[in-house]
């Protein structure tokens, strides 16, 4: 059964709100929900309570940082691997990956953790990086990160699909 694709806040929202919906996929961007600005633990716990969902993120560290929480919650997670081919822009890498594998992502087994690139997919597992490579990635990620504070009295309920654009 095809599942709702929930694109994490770090993903391009138009991918869900226009492109995937236009291709007949059921998708929503977290930026268009009450979860905008929420931390990973709150997102994981809330989205795991929704019915038939896959959280799609480009945060390759989410499974290692929140592995126990993901395991307890049973959330299905699809990770768009960090860009490794500089002939793609970051947005093109993300779009190509999600579009190419949307049929598999939407049918991932419940509770599974998968990693996707434009060239393939596999079960997610921690990457082995040199100390210099890890420092370079951390520096790049810090320079691209923006912080959004969650609003007070955040209401987190399952989105009404009939009200999606």
Image (cartoon, rainbow, N blue to C red):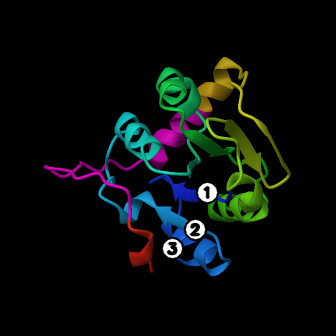
Give left or right: position of 10 versus 163: right
Q: Secondary structure at mark 2?
A: loop
Q: Is residue 117 above or below residue 73?
A: below
Q: Which residue is mark 1?
A: 3
Q: Are marks 1 and 3 in contact (CB under 8 Å)?
A: no
C-alpha gap between disc 2 and disc 1:
7 Å
Camera-nearest residue between 100 and 81: 100
Camera-nearest residue between 120 and 76: 76
Query: Pointer 3: residues within 10 angstroms few (<14), some, or many (20+)?
Result: some
Magenta-colored span:
137-159
Give the residue displayed 62% in from the left and 81% down from the top: 22
- Report the residue that reaches farthest toward the left: 152
* Label of residue 26 in the image: 2
Quadrant where the C terminus sits is bottom left
* Residue 161: quadrant of the picture: bottom left
Secondary structure mostly taken by the magenta-highlighted segment of the chain: loop
Q: Earlier in the sequence, mark 1 or mark 3?
A: 1
Give the residue displayed 62% in from the left and 72% down from the top: 20
Q: Which residue is mark 3?
A: 17
Q: Residue 30 magenta-drawn?
A: no
* Residue 30: quadrant of the picture: bottom left
Q: Is residue 17 above or below residue 134?
A: below
Give the residue displayed 52% in from the left and 56% down from the top: 6
Name the spot of residue 144 as percent of width and height, x first.
48, 49
Q: Earlier in the sequence, mark 3 or mark 2?
A: 3
Name the spot of residue 110 as percent of width and height, x first.
63, 40
Q: Are marks 2 and 1 in contact (CB under 8 Å)?
A: yes
Q: Residue 157 magenta-drawn?
A: yes
Camera-nearest residue between 74 and 96: 74
């Amino acid at each position: 059964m095809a599942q709702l694709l929930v694109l994490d806040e770090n993903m391009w929202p138009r991918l869900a709100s226009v492109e995937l919906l236009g291709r007949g996929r059921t998708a929503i961007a977290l930026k268009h929900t009450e979860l905008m600005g929420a931390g990973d633990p709150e997102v994981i716990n809330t989205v795991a309570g929704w019915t038939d969902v896959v959280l799609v993120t480009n945060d390759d560290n989410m499974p290692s940082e929140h592995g126990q929480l993901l395991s307890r919650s049973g959330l299905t997670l699809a990770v768009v691997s960090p860009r490794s081919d500089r002939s793609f822009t970051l947005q093109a890498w993300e779009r190509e990956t999600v579009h190419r594998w949307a049929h598999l992502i939407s049918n991932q087994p419940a509770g599974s953790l998968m990693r996707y690139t434009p060239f393939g997919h596999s079960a997610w597992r921690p990457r082995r990086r040199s100390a210099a490579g890890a420092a370079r990635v951390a520096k790049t990620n810090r320079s691209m990160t923006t912080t959004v504070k969650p609003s007070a009295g955040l209401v987190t309920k399952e989105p009404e699909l009939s009200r999606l654009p």
